[in-house]
Amino acid sequence: MPLRAALVVVVGFVASVTVPRWWAQRIGAQVDGSITQGILVGLFYGFFFTLLPLLAFIAIVRWRHSAKAIGFALVVAVLLALPNLMTLGIVLGRNNPSHAGERTLDVEAPAFRGASLAGAVLAVLLGGFVLQLLVSRKRAREGVRNVREELARAKERVEAPIPAEPALQDRREDELLADVPPPKPDEQR
């Protein structure tokens, strides 16, 4: 176990030194100094590499609710978000490779960082909207199911035969007529 921890620390250190410069050079090669290309590539990376992790996480968690599934969903979401996480590492990093990556992005990929942030915000808003739709759809289905159950219970009550009073069932018609008072002399005319 201590060997694994040491390996993670070494890999993390090497990645923090090499990844910011490497990522900034890859983005710089794609944008090639064009502001328009910087905006379009930034919007693409920011939007898709934020929306895909969100949708993958939601889909996996809705599919399975176990702790292992949630852990797997987090790993998948982090892997899908790596391009944005590498850009975020350049922007928030305080070491020399991060500053070198920032300078590379400023020169070779102008407007990439801001457009990437805008794309990420749009993706979060769209992901929240999709999540709200899923939740409201589930609530609506539950409401429809409750109304259908209530309607079925009401139909059962209406269609059930009306029980006759036991006292009336046992008496014959002539006995019932005996209970009717005779007409008054005024009414005989």
Image (cartoon, rainbow, N blue to C red):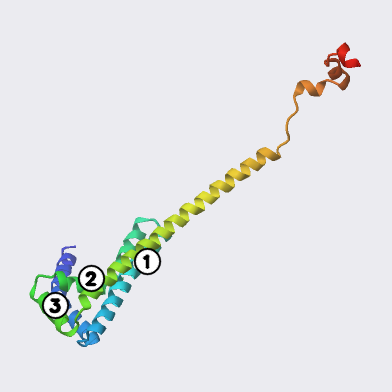
Mark 3: secondary structure: helix
Q: Position of residue 138 (x, y in %)?
A: 47, 55
Q: Work out whether residue 121 can be spotted.
A: yes
Q: Which residue is mark 3?
A: 102
Q: Quadrant of the N terminus?
A: bottom left
Q: Please tell me in which quadrant of the rendered image residue 181 appears.
A: top right
Q: Which residue is mark 2?
A: 85
Tell me which numbered mark, 2 or 1, is placed earlier along the sequence. Answer: 1
Residue 82 shown left or right of residue 104 in the figure: right
Mark 2 surroundings within 10 Å by alpha-carbon count, few (fewer than 14), some (14 through 19), many (20 or more): some
Mark 1: secondary structure: helix
The relative height of residue 123 versus residue 149 in the rendered view (above or below) is below
Residue 55 got which mark? 1
Q: Amino acid at mark 3?
A: Glu
Mark in front: 3 vs 2: 3
Q: Please tell me in which quadrant of the rendered image residue 113 appears.
A: bottom left
Mark in front: 3 vs 1: 3
Q: Amino acid at mark 2?
A: Leu
Q: Pointer 3 and pointer 1: residues touching (CB < 8 Å)?
A: no
Mark 2: secondary structure: helix
Q: CA distance from mark 3 to mark 1?
A: 30 Å
Q: Nearer the viewer, residue 110 or 23?
A: 110
The residue depicted at 20 percent of the width and 84 percent of the height is 28
Tell me which numbered mark, 3 or 2, is placed earlier along the sequence. Answer: 2
